[in-house]
Image: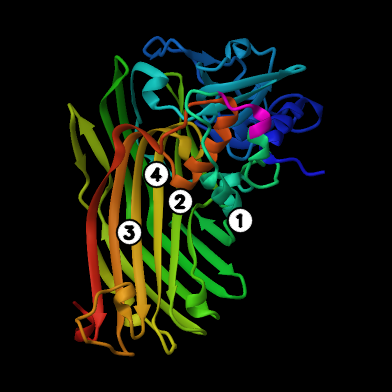
């Protein structure tokens, strides 16, 4: 009989010693993947390198290092929140709520619950800021870190990839202030009758198609850029889209300094950006009767282990977020467009002595126009909005919970064709033309030092954390909070002239 997913959140991880995961630890033997001349063990390949104490780094007093690192890990859930480790590993007994677990490059977070079962302990963690782990230390790359030879970590099956579960989590009533929420009551109100699943073994290179929020997604990274192909078809609405940040041999440099638990220097430069390519089409068999409005995280974390820097196992990673929104006014309508834009220069930001700066990007310059390619057939107006965000992260932790330097590039596009373009683009009063078409492109950057997660992930995680009466997590933490956002390009085009306000 199926169990509700919050009940399974404890059962799945506590069964790790009884056949779920590798009962002997992270795995015997080497993985065939090398970092700085060192071939990773199977455990390090799955869960990341272990931290080490260093004379030039002071950790915060409540940080607990788990001896054995990856070899002490038995399994981790797909959402990255519950780590099952060897209860006999040095430090495991100190993993109590309130402490910060630092087991591996990916296993970092504040403990909200620890449940022992036999010779394992299931530790559930919440996101932390980098300064909650490191009190003093200065870290910098010796040279450019290439974003190649990637490892792809999948979180497919995490509850935030299921639109029904995310909706139920968002609609769930919070527990009364000041009162504990009994586990039994929380379980009866859990979203979706689904168990939490174990994170699969990562793969070297880009993965094949994955599924999330009703979409089939084929993400790509990283030698020629970062992007994804999206497909959705429920027999009423059909969408195909492709967005790519074109890059040539991308790499990154960084400098991060912490003194007394405060960030004093934070710099991240990402090299190799060359352009943006967009291809989108949408069709509806039912018109205005239903629209699609989805925001989701692509459940693949592209990661490159940087290695130990003063004992801290840094990772350079890239992941992606998507928003898709349709506006159809008539049955059997469709719209499609494609465009390509060139950009140059370095992506990234810098912070020193309380002052922020963002690298100036050259462009985007139009190579092929979205507007000129807009096509569609319908008796009414049709349109689609597509936002695509690529996040580059340099730090510790996994998925969107990575703590450290974060830089995002947000590409937002809208295309529309029909007689009521006011759904996307304002019209001159009284002007209506079946030949009206419009296209817009906006490019923003975001940046902070800390962590930042999408709203849909925050909702599901906070519902989950209520079982432990844990403090809800914010969408972001660190400086600035919320992350800063800077527009670098914005253009809207219309045809004919009367379609523009």
Mark toward the start of the polypeptide (3 vs 1): 1
Q: CA distance from mark 4 to mark 3?
A: 16 Å
Q: CA distance from mark 1 to mark 4?
A: 20 Å
Q: Is residue 199 left or right of residue 453?
A: right
- Magenta region: which residues? 180-185
Label 3 crowd (10 A; few <14 / some 14-19 / many >=20)? many
Asked whether the viewer can see residue 417, the reply is: yes
Mark toward the start of the polypeptide (2 vs 4): 2
Mark toward the start of the polypeptide (4 vs 3): 3
Q: From the viewer's perspective, is residue 190 above or below residue 183?
A: below
Q: Is residue 114 left or right of residue 16?
A: left
SS under mark 2: strand
Mark toward the start of the polypeptide (1 vs 4): 1
Mark toward the start of the polypeptide (2 vs 1): 1
Residue 187 placement (x, y as % from top left):
67, 36
Q: Is residue 7 left or right of residue 79?
A: right
SS under mark 4: strand
Which residue matches tag 2?
A: 320
SS under mark 1: strand
Residue 473 placement (x, y as % from top left):
45, 32
Which residue matches tag 4?
A: 392
Q: Which mark is residue 274?
A: 3
Q: From the viewer's perspective, is residue 320 above or below residue 325?
A: above
Q: Residue at x 46, y 12 (%)?
A: 62
Asked whether the viewer can see residue 75, the reply is: no
Mark toward the start of the polypeptide (3 vs 2): 3
Would you say residue 183 sits in the magenta stretch?
yes
Q: CA distance from mark 2 to mark 4?
A: 9 Å
Which residue matches tag 1?
A: 210
């Amino acid at each position: 009989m199926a169990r509700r997913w919050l009940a399974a959140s404890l059962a799945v991880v506590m069964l790790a010693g009884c056949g779920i995961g590798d009962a002997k630890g992270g795995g015997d033997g080497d993985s065939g993947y090398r970092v700085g001349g060192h071939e990773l063990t199977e455990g390090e390949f799955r869960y990341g390198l272990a931290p080490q104490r260093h004379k030039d780094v002071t950790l915060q007093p409540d940080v607990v290092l788990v001896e054995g690192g990856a070899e002490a890990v038995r399994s981790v859930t797909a959402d990255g929140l519950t780590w099952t480790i060897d209860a006999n590993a040095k430090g495991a007994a100190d993993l109590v709520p309130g402490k910060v677990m630092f087991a591996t490059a990916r296993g970092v977070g504040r403990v909200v619950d620890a449940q022992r079962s036999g010779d394992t302990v299931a530790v559930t963690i919440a996101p932390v800021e980098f300064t909650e782990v490191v009190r003093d230390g200065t870290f910098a790359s010796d040279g450019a870190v290439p974003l190649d030879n990637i490892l792809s970590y999948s979180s497919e099956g995490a509850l935030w990839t299921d639109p029904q579960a995310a909706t139920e989590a968002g609609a769930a009533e919070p527990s009364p202030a000041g009162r504990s929420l009994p586990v039994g009551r929380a379980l009866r109100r859990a979203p979706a009758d689904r168990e939490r699943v174990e994170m699969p073994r990562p793969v070297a290179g880009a993965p094949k198609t994955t599924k999330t929020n009703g979409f089939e997604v084929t993400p790509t990274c990283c030698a020629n850029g970062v992007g994804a192909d999206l497909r959705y078809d429920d027999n009423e609405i059909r969408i195909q889209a492709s967005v790519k940040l074109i890059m040539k041999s991308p790499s990154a440099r960084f400098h991060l300094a912490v003194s007394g638990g405060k960030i004093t220097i934070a710099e991240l430069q990402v090299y190799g950006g060359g352009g943006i390519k967009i291809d989108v089409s949408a069709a509806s068999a039912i018109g205005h009767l239903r629209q699609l409005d989805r925001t989701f995280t692509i459940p693949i974390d592209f990661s490159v282990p940087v290695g130990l820097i003063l004992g801290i196992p840094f990772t350079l990673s890239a992941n992606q977020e998507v928003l898709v929104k349709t506006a159809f006014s008539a049955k059997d309508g469709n719209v499609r467009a494609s465009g390509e834009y060139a950009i140059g220069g370095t992506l990234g930001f810098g912070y020193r002595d309380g002052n922020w700066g963002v690298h100036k990007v050259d462009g985007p310059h139009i190579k092929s126009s979205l507007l000129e390619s807009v096509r569609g057939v319908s008796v009414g107006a049709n349109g689609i909005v597509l936002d695509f965000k690529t996040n580059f992260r340099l730090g510790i932790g996994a998925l969107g919970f990575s703590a450290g330097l974060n830089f995002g590039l947000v590409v937002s596009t809208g295309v529309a064709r029909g007689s009521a373009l006011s759904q996307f683009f304002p019209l001159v009063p009284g002007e209506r033309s079946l030949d009206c078409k419009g296209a817009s492109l906006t490019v923003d950057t975001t940046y902070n030092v800390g962590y930042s997660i999408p709203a849909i992930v925050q909702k599901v995680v906070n519902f989950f954390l209520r079982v432990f009466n844990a403090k809800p997590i914010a969408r972001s933490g660190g400086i600035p909070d919320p992350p800063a956002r800077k527009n670098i390009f914005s253009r809207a085009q219309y045809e004919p002239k009367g379609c523009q306000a």
